[in-house]
Image: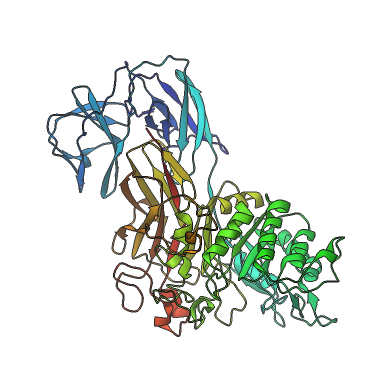
Amino acid sequence: MSVAACLAPAFDRIEGVVVDSATGNGLANVRVSALVSGRTAVTDASGHFLIDGEPGRPVVLDAPPPELEVVGDRVVSNTPGWSVDWIGADGRTASLGASPLRWDASRLSSGIGWIRFRSQGREAIWNLCRIPGETRVRRVSLPKISRRRTATEPETLFVRKPGDPGRTFPVRTDSVVRAALGATIQVAGDFHTHTFLTDGVHTLDDVAAHAFGGTWIPVGGPESRVAGFGLDWFANSEHGGAFSRDRFGNPFPSGSKWRWETLRDDSWPAVDSLRHVYPRKHLFQGLEWNVPSHEHASVAILAGDRDAIARFEYFFDEWDTDLVGGPWPDAGTKTNASSHAKALAGARWLSEKHGDSSWFLINHPSRLQRTSISDLRDLHDAGGSVFLGIEAIPGHQKASWRGGYHLSNRSAAGEMVARTHGGTDFMLAKVGGVMDALWSEGRRVWVFSNSDFHTAAGGDYYPGEYNKNLTRVGDRTESGILAGLRSGATVAVAGDLVDSFWMELDDGLRTAPMGGELATAADSVEVRVAYHVPRTSAVGDAPAVDHVDLIGGAVGARFAPQDPGYRLPSVATTAILGTRQVAGAEPGPHGWHVASWKFAVAGDSYFRVRGTSTPRAKAGWTDSVGNPLCDDLQYPNDDAKARSNLWFYSNPVFLKKLAR
């Protein structure tokens, strides 16, 4: 049994087992935190843990405790006058003598445990974790306690696996606990694809076969089969308005049909039939909403019939000017106004009518300069959780103007705001730009990567071939995928630079995952990320991460619409907080790379990560600190350039500072 007595005293023992909820098997290396008493344990190979108690005494850290420094595998403390013990994961305690301390952690038989300092009634504890080639220490915050608990008092356990959100379990001391954790699954998806029905030149069968792997019959050709590009889901989200071709590229006998009609009569039946062909995948019927007076947006409604999405297109799409054909009783109330107010009405309609089963996000938001930060704030306020955020790594990645961005608009500082930077929309690519400004208000809006697929013969990659959204979900159902997308647990990826990723914020007791919030009274927190680089990408390349950056800033109150800050597309408190060089470094076990940063808790804040294949200060590609330069410098862009300049961006994790 793995005993991890973190030795916050005066509490009684709790023991138990952590199991996989699907199989019942014990889960090893799961951290269990007793939140009230501030103690932790780690499960052993069979999933068992023990949080032990000991006689009560005050723990008063009324003077600065000693600090630790790690040099290689050597743990060093230069503060004199403290007795030092090692507490192993097996519960055994060994004296390390008195500080100053010089101690070689490579001699440990166990790679996890605690270093305890004690002096005249004061106590300080650091958690130590040793992995091949690296030793890390983290201060464990202990509460000030001066009374003994009774065996019947309640406690709360926080149980989590690395990279997972974790669960809380109410327990009583002197009890045996069985905690079941479900698996957290990663799925890959794409919101934004087109076919013959609008301005694409492929059938939906063709698109699905390439996304998922399968068989289809090309127009005028023999049956073909492809392995697929690794997606678990995608949405058919193509333009509203009126179009002239059926799903196979043949002209409609009537000349053209409104999109609400083809959604109902052509697109929905095609999507529904392919769901039976790919029963383990998810194909969503969506729409590329021509947002009145703004840019496009990917919309989907997970309702079980075709009526909802057709109705939304009829009433709210800017290009659908049909005023007579709608089959709904209130169709005559439709107007063809193109206004911001109508855009907000569409967002509210989705939230009010399908708040638990719909999404929308702004596509290629800076391309036509029709969407400002105040528009995004308005849409988020109107749509709530239905508004997911922006397509920050757009499609058309091998087009001459990368992403199809080609306007010459500049910011007041002369920045090219209507061009991609490293294939990424300027709203995200700029540190301290639009997305950072939204996150600095604590807004839960997110960034994504989509193919915007139209044609394989042009500037596009098939869904999953280059752009991917990697999202952690609780299950693979439609509702599970929607919940994962809304949670912010997505990393937006180009070129399969990473094929798995997790990020968490840790205060020594609790963690919060990407998209979540850690509320803590601790003095310091650790940001931890892990990511896996595949040996081969979907296009056959061998991706390689050069470095990753941690970016973050302060979180304050939301701006009111009448405040001038509501229209300001930047924030001054966001910065690059740290960098980890990856090129040349060996990955850890099973090919995973791990990076972590520790910070004092100064106030409410957020943290996000980006990674790239491109070195810092590469002429024409990145500046001296690694920010992507405008892709104009590489015009004309092509397939080779897009595949040589890859990026991934996480969504943020938030920190809320609590008073002690």
Q: Quadrant of the N terminus?
A: top left
Residue 438 position in % (x across, y down)? 49, 57
In this rendering, the answer to whether 562 lies above or below 397 is: above
Q: Is residue 622 left or right of residue 500?
A: left
- Taking depth in this image into account, of 478 and 322 the one nearest to the observer is 322
Identify the residue at horizontal 76%, vertical 59% (top origin): 308
Image quadrant assignment for residue 84: top left
Q: Is residue 521 left or right of residue 463?
A: left
- Taking depth in this image into account, of 346 and 635 the one nearest to the observer is 346
Residue 82 position in % (x across, y down)? 16, 29
Identify the residue at horizontal 56%, vertical 36% (top origin): 21
In this rendering, the answer to whether 31 lies above or below 391 is: above
Residue 606 position in % (x across, y down)? 42, 51
Q: Is residue 175 left or right of residue 310?
A: left
Count of residue discs: 0
Residue 509 can be seen in this image = yes
Residue 270 can be seen in this image = no
Q: Quadrant of the C terminus?
A: top left
Identify the residue at horizontal 20%, vertical 49% (top origin): 72
